[in-house]
Image (cartoon, grey):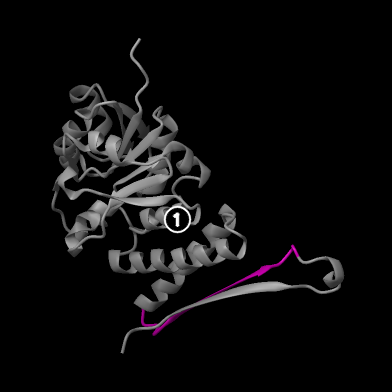
Amino acid sequence: MSPSPKYSIITTCKGRLHHLVRSLPAMLRQPLSEVIVVDYTCPDCTADHVAANFPAAKLVQVKDVPGFNPSHARNLGAQTATGDVFLFVDADIVLADSFIRAIEAALGPNEYAKFAEPVARQENSVQGTCVVHRRHFEAIGGYDDVFTNYGGEDLEFYDRLALAKVERRALDRTELVEVIDHGPEERGRFFAMEPASSFLVGKVYRIAMGMLMRLDNGSRVKRDLRAAIYKEITRLVGNMAKGEKNLQLQITIPDGRTDGLHDRWQFTRSILIRVDPRN
């Protein structure tokens, strides 16, 4: 009986099989690891190809979903994982064969790891690569699957790790062999909103979630409210794309913790976020 892997490498695929065939071999060469491929209704029949050509990889298959929700896909991969440490890596990232050994030597018990901020716009892909202990992933609730537009879900995940006092370690760029080049059309292929507007939705949402969690001593906002806020931000950003000059989001929530001498009063708390174009 083989020992349980320490690391679970989780990658997702929707229309990226041509990338995955180049990146998956390097994932499978990593020691102490299992590899999980999430086929999120991939039109390239990724699950069939991986089963036939890379049988060592575990497969998770999501059927009959027209769009792409990377957060949901990653969370499904994590549910299948057996390792104590998760490595989320996109299909366009080719890891060095020494990657896991470098993580073994560097990752602390209260740390997560990601590559440093990109020095060029085309390197944004590396921001989704994340090494995180299972216990930290589960403690903060995984990725936020209310994201339905392209981009931002990884940064929001890092925001919550920071709020949970999990320290960040920068991954050494020498452990990255290649970021497979592709353009914005391919990135946004399965999303209704174009990338620039999508990133604005994600940015405003991240600000709103950070403010709300700080108002409630770090407690995560309930999913129904998160989904409603994300939907409203998407609507407001859509209005800007149609000609609105600015965006203004106000969220008002009751303060149910006020009692004692103040129980005759109703208290509410509000946050206000405004986005204006630069002059």
User: 81 left or right of 92?
Assistant: right
Image-based side of 180 in relation to 125, left or right: left
Give coordinates of residue 120: x percent, y percent. 17, 63
Q: Nearer the viewer, residue 45 or 127?
A: 127
The structure residue drawn at horizontal position 17% and vertical position 60%, both measured from the top left corner, is 122
Check the picture and name the quadrant holding the C terminus.
bottom left
Q: Which residue is drawn at the image coordinates 53% and 67% (left, top)?
A: 211
Please indicate whether residue 254 sits to the left or right of residue 210 in the image.
right
255 part of magenta stretch: yes
What residue is at 65 percent from the left and 72 percent from the top? 269
Instruction: Please indicate whether residue 278 sits to the left or right of residue 223 in the image.
Output: left
* Range of residues picked out in magenta: 242-257
Q: Amino acid at mark 1?
A: Ala
Residue with the most extreme top position: 1
Q: Residues within 10 Å of mark 1 (few under 14, many from 20)?
A: some
Magenta span includes 160:
no
Q: Which residue is mark 1?
A: 162
Q: Quadrant of residue 88?
A: top left
Residue sitting at x 24%, y 52%? 126
Instruction: Answer whether residue 77 is visible to the viewer in this image.
Output: yes
**Element type at marker 1?**
helix
User: Could you say which is closer to the camera, residue 148 or residue 178?
Assistant: 178
Where is residue 50? Give x, y as percent.
Answer: 23, 28
Q: Can residue 45 be seen from the camera position used here?
A: no
Does residue 241 sit above or below 145 in this rendering? Answer: below
x and y percent of residue 156 in the render?
Answer: 42, 57
Height in image: 150 above or below 262? above
**Number of marks in picture:** 1
Residue 155 percent location from the top left of the image: 37, 57
- Residue 206 lies, with reference to residue 27, above or below; the image says below
What is the quadrant of the N terminus in the image? top left
